[in-house]
Amino acid sequence: MVPIEVHKEQHGYVLNAVLMPLLASAMQLWANDVSDPQTIDKDWMISTNSPMGPFMILDMVGLRTPYQMELNAYQTTKDEIHQTIAQKLKAMIDAGHVGQESGQGFYHYPNPEFEDPDFLKK
């Protein structure tokens, strides 16, 4: 986290206000079977010249937090997409795939696929 000047109080951090819609959109694409996490990450990285894609970020954060957020979103909105995302994340968590800390999430650690120099070319 970096200290920045804000002009008025807002719930959460400025970073989260920008980051959370990105992660939510990526998870919706995945949950709706539009594309797989690696392809979504590659597209984001190539298109924005970003060093990390949304699923890499999710692995870094850990999947328990987004799971809880999706459960809360479903309870609040009753929008089925949140339930679908939560179920998919729950299956990964139940399998012990909670992100970098467990050695597997959307990628395998300590040598994740995105560290391959040809990752963006495949």
Image (cartoon, grey):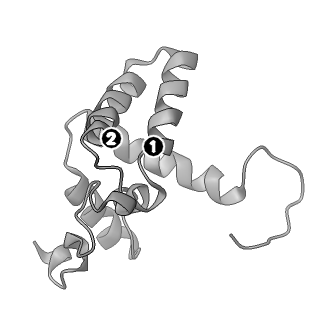
Give percent across and percent down for residue 16. Answer: 63, 53
69 on left or right of 101: right
- The reply to whether the C-beta atoms of the residues labelled 1 and 2 are less than 8 Å apart is yes
Type of amino acid under label 1: Arg
Type of amino acid under label 2: Ile
Mark 2: give few (<14), some (14-19) or many (20+) Cα within 10 Å: some
At numbered mark 2, what does the secondary structure look like: helix, strand or loop? helix
**Residues at marks 1 and 2, CA–CA distance in whole angstroms:** 7 Å
Residue at 38% x, 30% y is 86
Query: Which mark is on residue 93?
Result: 2
Q: In which quarter of the image is residue 3?
A: bottom right
Mark 1: give few (<14), some (14-19) or many (20+) Cα within 10 Å: some
In the image shown, does 23 or 101 lie closer to the viewer?
101
Q: Judge whether 39 appears above or below 91 on screen.
A: below
**Residue wearing tag 1:** 64
Give percent across and percent down for residue 106. Answer: 26, 55
Q: In which quarter of the image is residue 79?
A: top left
Residue at 48% x, 14% y is 78
In the image shown, does 111 or 31 lie closer to the viewer?
111
At numbered mark 1, what does the secondary structure look like: helix, strand or loop? helix
Residue at 44% x, 37% y is 67
Image quadrant where one finds the N terminus: bottom right
Q: In which quarter of the image is residue 56?
A: bottom left
Image quadrant where one finds the C terminus: bottom left
